Amino acid sequence: MFDHILDIHFSPDNGTPYWLDCLKKHGMQRSDFQTLEDLQQLGPMDVEAMRTRPITDFIPRTLHSQMGKMVLAETGGTTGDPCRRVYLPVEFHTAFVKPWLQAVDGFHFPLKQTWLFIGPSGPHIIAQAARAFARATDSLEPFSIDCDVRWIKQQQVDTMGHTLYMDHLLNQALNIITQQNISVLFTTPPLLLALAARMTKEDRLQITGIHTGGMTQDTETSRQLAVLFPSAIILPGYGNSLFGVAFEKEQITNESSTFFVQDPNLHIQLIPLPEHAQEEPQLTKTVANGERGRVMFHRFDQSFLIINMLERDTAIQVIKDGEQGMQCIEGLHFQQKKNGEIY
């Protein structure tokens, strides 16, 4: 998979304009990359290029004739202009739906239920994932409440703007819950807690499945949700628009969620934390088991190649039964604390 994807994107004749420019800039060619470690020579992924260059610059020329089949995704855009990418349908399934179905099967998430999704639509891939997740469980696509996360994050908590917008979202959600026999919820942990405070006990007892995304779910929030929704199987996920989503393989009471990657197209590495924002990232190093590191990933898809993408999230390295997992995801310590975004 690794070699085949590089062959596509680094092809001198039909490859990807961005990556061909990158090779030229570094004076390199396809034969210089035989292992994952070799990719570190290219340095961190150019986020600014992903924000400003045309999307077709990141798609291999050989696939430009298939644009009508592709799924377009943007990042949240709450810390700057959004990054954009595409997925072929099979890549979208591998990155989002397949991990979801593994979690559904592993935790016996309820099937054939009525869903409510409270989250962003528009350019965000999370809404497309919500529809795909529901349909994958033989359910109708979710009833939906649209959130503009780029707007709400400009409103300070406890301000009139923030309060009015939250009321607007929650009132719409309660209208659907009281009329449509909702049994599965998909939203962020903070929105879910706010919604639970307005739901009746009877409505909360009808919820049999919950998927949380969009922000980190800490152990205290998990405890509160388990009490508020005692009938529900609760599946938190970690991911984003650029690389897909990962789920837990098991849930341990009073411990933070540990997310394992089971996607052959995705490689995640936790590199040492910098002392300050200006420090060059140490791409060649990986933190030891039990240590905190910065999330970096590669994603190898035919339609879109991402190499050495540095996230603002950090996590604790967890090696269990020979598999790598990530625990306790949060914002980089030299920045203002921000929860990791999902999708």
Image (cartoon, grey):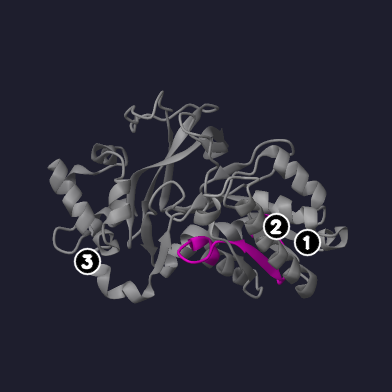
Is residue 189 placed above or below 304 in the rendered structure? Answer: above
* Place of residue 322 in the rendered image (x, y in percent of width and height, measured from the top left): 53, 37
Say if the magenta span includes residue 126.
yes
* Discs 3, 2 touching: Cβ within 8 Å: no
Residue behind mark 1: 207
40 sits left or right of 117 in the view: left
The answer, for residue 331, to whether it is visible in the render is yes
Q: Nearer the viewer, residue 292 or 300?
A: 292
* Place of residue 87 in the rendered image (x, y in percent of width and height, measured from the top left): 39, 64
Task: Tell me the number on the disc at residue 61.
Answer: 3
Distance between the Cα atoms at labels 2 and 1? 8 Å
156 sits left or right of 312 in the view: right
* Place of residue 298 in the rendered image (x, y in percent of width and height, measured from the top left): 37, 47
Taking the view exactly as shown, the residue that stands out farthest to the top is 275
Say if the magenta span includes residue 123.
yes
Q: Dot 3 lies on which element?
A: helix
Label 3, residues with CA under 10 Å away: few <14, some 14-19, many ≥20? some
Q: Amino acid at mark 3?
A: Arg
Q: Amino acid at mark 1?
A: Ile
Label 2, residues with CA under 10 Å away: few <14, some 14-19, many ≥20? many
**Count of numbered badges drawn on the protein:** 3
Residue behind mark 2: 210
